[in-house]
Amino acid sequence: MPNRLQKFRVIITGVTGMVGEGVLLECLESAAVEHVLVLGRRPYGMKHAKLEECIVKDFTDLSAVEDELRNYDACFNCAGVSSAGMSEAEYTRIAYDMVLSFAESLRRLNPKMIFIHVTGSSTDGTEKGRVMWARVKGRAENALGRIGFSEVYNFRPGLMKPSEGQRSIKTVYKVGLVLLPIIRLFMPMLTLHQVGRAMINAVTRGYDKTVLEVADIAALAE
C-alpha cells in the first residue's frame, strides 16, 4: 500500500445527482481536501474557494480538457443513471464502456490516482446473475481493478439519506424521506455524510477491501 495522503486534490463526477452532490459538500467541508474539480455535462453553479468546474460533453473523449485533469490524487466517480427502460446494450454503453473509457483516460493522466466508483447494493461481481444492471455494474467493478490505478474502491451503498443543504434531490425521493424512520428499522441505511467521509478516509487511510458494502462504508466513515 502506498504512503497515505493527508491532503489531496480530487475530481468528482455526478454532482448534479444526489450522491455526487452529497459527496461534494462533504469534501468542501473537509480539511483533507485541498481542491475539488467538478466534472460534468452541465454547470453545478456553486461558488467556493476550493471548487472548480469543468464541463465535458463526452466522457469518452477528454482530449479537449486533458490539461485541466492533470495532477489530481483521487477521483470520486459518483455519476450514474437508472437502467429503467434500457436494453442491456444501451446500459452497458453508459455504465461500462463510458466508465472504463473515462477511467483509462484519468489513469493515463494521473498514474498514482486513487479511483473510487459508486455502484450499488446487490451489484453482481460474478457478472452471471439474472439482474441486468447488477451484471453490468459488476463487470465495471472488475474491469476497473485491472486498469492499473494506485488503488480502486467500489462503493455499494444502498438507501441513503441526503445531507442538509442538498438541492439535487428528486421529488419522489423527497416524498420517500418521510418514511425513512420506518424503512431504517428493516434495512441498513447510510447518510451521504457517511458516504463522503468514507471516500475521504479511503484516500487518507486506505481500506482492506476493494468492494465496500454498506457496513464497510459505515465503518470507514468513523
Image: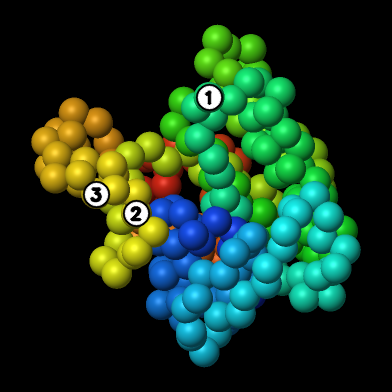
State the image coordinates of residue 203 (x, y, percent, origin top left): 58, 62
Q: Secondary structure at mark 1?
A: loop
Q: Which mark is residue 174?
A: 3
What amino acid is labelled 1 in the image? Gly
The colour scheme of the drawn protein is rainbow
Q: On the image, numbered disc 2 is attached to which residue?
A: 169
What amino acid is labelled 2 in the image? Ile
State if disc 2 and disc 3 touch (CB < 8 Å): yes
Say which quadrant the N terminus sits in. bottom right
Please tell me how many numbered marks the rendered image carries.
3
State the image coordinates of residue 200 (x, y, percent, origin top left): 50, 64
Quadrant hosting residue 132: top right
Q: Residue furthest bottom?
A: 49
Residue at figure coordinates x 46%, y 54% from the top left = 17
Is any atom of residue 44 visible in this view?
yes
**Dot placed on the residue nearer the N-terminal end, 1 or 3:** 1
* Left or right: 99, with 188 as reference point: right
What amino acid is labelled 3 in the image? Lys
How packed mark 2 is, by other alpha carbons closer than 10 Å (few <14, some 14-19, many 20 or more), is some
- The residue closer to the viewer here, 56 or 214, is 56
Q: On the image, numbered disc 1 is attached to which residue?
A: 85
Eyeballing the image, is 141 above or below 27? above
C-alpha span from label 2 to label 1: 21 Å
Eyeballing the image, is 207 above or below 31? above
Which of discs 2 and 1 lies nearer the camera? The answer is: 1
C-alpha span from label 3 to label 2: 7 Å
State the image coordinates of residue 91 (x, y, percent, origin top left): 64, 29
Eyeballing the image, is 186 above or below 43? above
**Dot placed on the residue nearer the N-terminal end, 2 or 1:** 1
Residue at figure coordinates x 68%, y 58% from the top left = 114
